Structures are given as structure tokens and as C-alpha cells.
Image: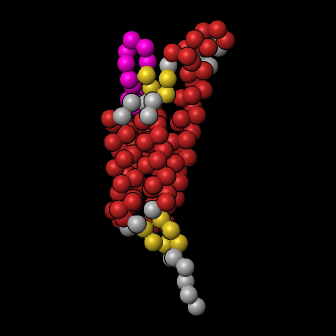
Amino acid sequence: MYILNKKVAIAGMAGALMSVFLFPFLKVPIKGNWTLYQTDTSLFFISLILLGVTVLVFMLRNIKLFQMLSWCFLIWCLLGLVAVYFKINNYFGMKLVDGLLAKTIQLKWGWAVLLISAILMVLSVRKLKQIH
């Protein structure tokens, strides 16, 4: 049997939703800070869909499916971070230009908030120990 800590789950979902919409994920010279939508639209929309389904499952009180979707969301966020990092470092395929680009474009704190929120969602579900 699984137990869901609703306050932790809601804090994780709210943090993830706010970070996706409001917080900066990249610092681009001249253009300023970019949100997840400006960074990569497909990453943004897939993250929103996955988060929306997770919220729906939370409302339907299916704890096991919520736990599975929370893990999927955490893995998706990690893959997104790695993909954006490699895209910054290998955009043109030329070592000199990619090196300059990697030094000028910086990852911002929105990634940390998104990952912490996803970890909170995962940690909100725990297994109840049964006594026989």
C-alpha cells in the first residue's frame, strides 16, 4: 500500500509549473534570460503535457500512477537538461564556434527549481510498512 503526502506533492507540482512558465533557464547574451518556452518549444510542451497528466492523476487519487508519472517527469527533466547542455556545446559542429557559444550561453537556476520540484513529486509517495 502506498501513501501520498499531499502537501509535498502539491508543492512539487506548483514549483514545477511555476518554473516552466516563469523562471529563467538560459542566459543568452543581448537577448537576456530565456524561459523554457524560449529555450525549446517541444521540451516546453512535452513537459507541460506530462505535468498536466500528473496533476490529473493526482486529482483522481491514483497513487501508483502518480508515482510512475512523477518518475517519468523527473527523468524527462534530467534528459531535457542534458539535451540543452549538449545542444549549447555542439550547436554548429565547429570546435571554435561551439567553444565560444558554450562560454557565452549559461544555464540558469530555473533548471534547479524544476529538478527539485520533480524530486519532491517523487518523494511524496512512499510505501506503507505492513505489520503482520
Residue at image point 53% right, 36% down = 80
Give the image location of residue 36, x and y in percent.
41, 32
Residue in the foreground of this view, choosing between 122 and 92: 122
Res. 52 in view: no
- Which residue is at a point 37% across and 52% down the rendered structure image? 13
- Does 34 sit left or right of 82 as displayed? left
Q: How many labels were placed on the picture?
A: 0
Task: Name the residue: 57% across, 31% down.
Answer: 83
Determine the image quadrant of residue 49: top left
Please, is residue 22 above or below residue 119 in the view? above
Residue 39 lies in magenta, yes or no? yes
Which region is colored magenta?
A: 28-41
Figure check: 34 above or below 128? above
Q: Position of residue 65 (x, y in %)?
A: 48, 62
Q: Is residue 98 magenta?
A: no
Residue 88 visible to an observer of this rendering: yes
Q: Residue furthest bottom?
A: 132
Image vertical order of residue 91 relative to residue 69, above or below: above
- Considering every residue shown, the one lying at the far right of the view is 95
Quadrant of the snapshot with the C terminus? bottom right
- Structure colour scheme: secondary structure
Q: Is residue 66 left or right of residue 6?
A: right
Q: Pinpoint residue 90: horizontal percent, then vertical percent.
A: 62, 19
Name the residue: 37% across, 18% down: 32
